[in-house]
């Protein structure tokens, strides 16, 4: 009987020590995969090549010698194939007016510079939109019946 009682209490003590004191597991020292992904994402963002896109904004500078225009804070170059228009008519680079609306389309060249394929001073079709005349006639108010 002593053996059974001793075995019983020994099993309770062992079970209790395991349950109350679980084995300690080490945490992962670093998250190397996560760090690698961040570095890879950052490198692809900085290695991004310029792509063709439309532009629009206010003309802030014209460089006749360097053949470039500045729209906002971005510089676009004018090449020999660039089609320049003002109010729907063919124009020269010198005809642009500072603080005037300008639109166009640019493409990157071999050196990475953004070269305009089209430039529209005054916006695209700025004179084509005509304002509608305001009506000055007013209708008389509807009659109100009083009982």
Image (cartoon, rainbow, N blue to C red):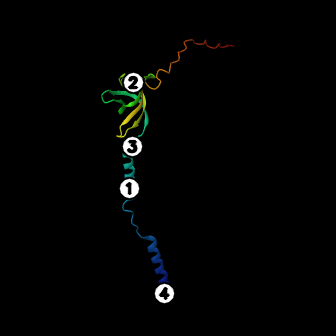
| In this rendering, the label closer to the viewer, 3 or 4 | 3
How many numbered marks appear? 4
The quarter of the displayed image where residue 59 is located: top left
Label 4: few (<14), some or many (≥20) within 10 Å?
few
Give the CA separation, mark 4 to mark 2.
102 Å
Question: In the rendering, which numbered label is found on residue 49?
Answer: 3
Question: Height in image: 39 above or below 140?
Answer: below
The CA span between labels 3 and 2 is: 29 Å
Which residue, given by chain and number where applicable, does mark 1 sit on? 36
Of the image marks 3 and 4, the number of the one nearer the N terminus = 4
Give the CA distance from mark 3 to mark 4: 81 Å
Q: Nearer the viewer, mark 1 or mark 3?
A: 3
Give the Cα distance between marks 1 and 2: 47 Å
Considering every residue shown, the one lying at the far front of the view is 80
Tag 1 secondary structure: helix
Q: Which mark is residue 3?
A: 4
Q: List the residue tagged with mark 2.
A: 100
Between tags 1 and 4, which lies in front? Answer: 1
Q: Tell me: residue 32, above or below residue 147.
A: below
Residue 85 point in image, percent of width and height? 42, 25
Between the residue at mark 1 and the residue at mark 4, the CA separation in whole angstroms equals 60 Å
Q: Earlier in the sequence, mark 1 or mark 3?
A: 1
């Amino acid at each position: 009987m002593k053996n059974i009682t001793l075995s019983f209490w020994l099993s309770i003590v062992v079970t209790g020590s395991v349950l109350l004191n679980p084995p300690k597991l080490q945490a992962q020292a670093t998250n190397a995969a996560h760090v690698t992904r961040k570095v890879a994402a950052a490198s692809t963002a900085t290695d991004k090549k310029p792509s063709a896109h439309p532009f629009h904004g206010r003309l802030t500078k014209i460089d006749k010698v360097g053949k470039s225009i500045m729209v906002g804070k971005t510089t676009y170059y004018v090449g020999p194939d660039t089609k320049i228009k003002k109010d729907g008519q063919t124009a020269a680079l010198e005809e642009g007016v500072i603080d005037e609306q300008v639109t166009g389309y640019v493409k990157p060249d071999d050196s990475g510079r953004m070269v305009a394929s089209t430039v529209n001073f005054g916006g695209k079709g700025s004179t084509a939109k005509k304002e509608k005349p305001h009506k000055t006639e007013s209708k008389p108010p509807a009659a109100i019946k009083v009982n």
